[in-house]
Amino acid sequence: MYHRRSTPGILTIPALAAVAVALAGTPVEAQAGPKILTPPRPADTASRAATRPATTTVTSASAPVVTRPGGPVAQPAPATAAPTIPQSALLDSIRELVFRNLLEKDRAGFATLASAFCLGLSTNDFKKASAPIDRADPPEAMVRRLASPRTPARRASTCTFTANASPTRSVTGRPLLYSVGAITMTSSERAEAAAGFNYDGYSAGGFTFSVERSDSAWVVKQWRMEWTAKPNAP
């Protein structure tokens, strides 16, 4: 019987079939070579910075600065709080007396020209010119008692003042501001009260009133002008 000699290195048909059967039973993962895992691309930091919200840098309690893409933007400072004025029935009775004396005696000399009579309270001693002057409104009941047809007084907060009043502007028609400031009790029957006036930047001055209690009422014993000048504004 004749047999064909097998050549070394060449797989016969039966051998190829055996290899195919063996590969068929092997998982696909085992047949494939090792995988190369590519790490995810890092986030685009430039685009993230462009969409990042503005951050606030506070340089002081009253003037925050907001940093924006176009540069820092200063924010307006909050309004100044009203001064704390000492309150008592005794002090109010002295204040009302001084206001009445200022209005009726026209201590500023502008009552016949004023467009409005504005009343304010202050903690200033009015010994010398100072700007700005702290100011708050007196009680509404006090203002009503002081108002008269000749001097229709009202609270200072309801008046409009012109800053840096022009020297060419007419003198008539300016609001006249009267302020009663610090009150010093020298005894239970005597006191000194500071007061000031400002004729809408045209003229201003300071006074000191000496008052005494007489028959359960306060009266002005004397007064003196501390200074007078032409400032910028009330």
Image: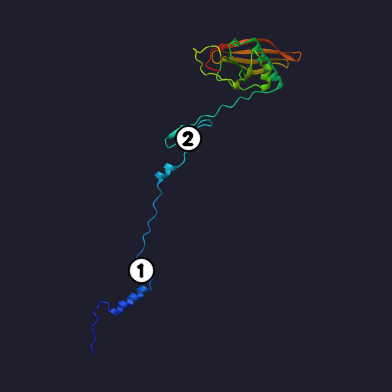
Q: Is residue 66 above or below residue 117?
A: below
The N terminus sits in image quarter: bottom left
Q: Earlier in the sequence, mark 1 or mark 2?
A: 1
The C terminus sits in image quarter: top right
Residue sitting at x 65%, y 10%: 105
Write down the residue under mark 2: 66
Q: Is residue 181 above or below residue 75?
A: above
- Quarter of the image for residue 200 reads top right
Write down the residue under mark 1: 31
Mark 2, other Cα within 10 Å: few <14 / some 14–19 / many ≥20 = some
Viewer-proximal residue, 44 or 110?
110
Left/right placement of residue 159 relative to residue 48 reads: right
Q: Amino acid at mark 2?
A: Val
- Quarter of the image for residue 125 reads top right
Left/right placement of residue 145 relative to residue 132 reads: right
Residue sitting at x 28%, y 79%: 13
Residue 207 appears in the rendering: yes
Mark 1, other Cα within 10 Å: few <14 / some 14–19 / many ≥20 = few
Q: CA distance from mark 1 to mark 2?
A: 62 Å
Q: Is residue 175 above or below residue 50?
A: above
Mark on residue 188?
Answer: none
Residue sitting at x 45%, y 33%: 72
**Label 1 element class:** helix
Residue 127 appears in the rendering: no
Left/right placement of residue 91 relative to residue 49 reads: right
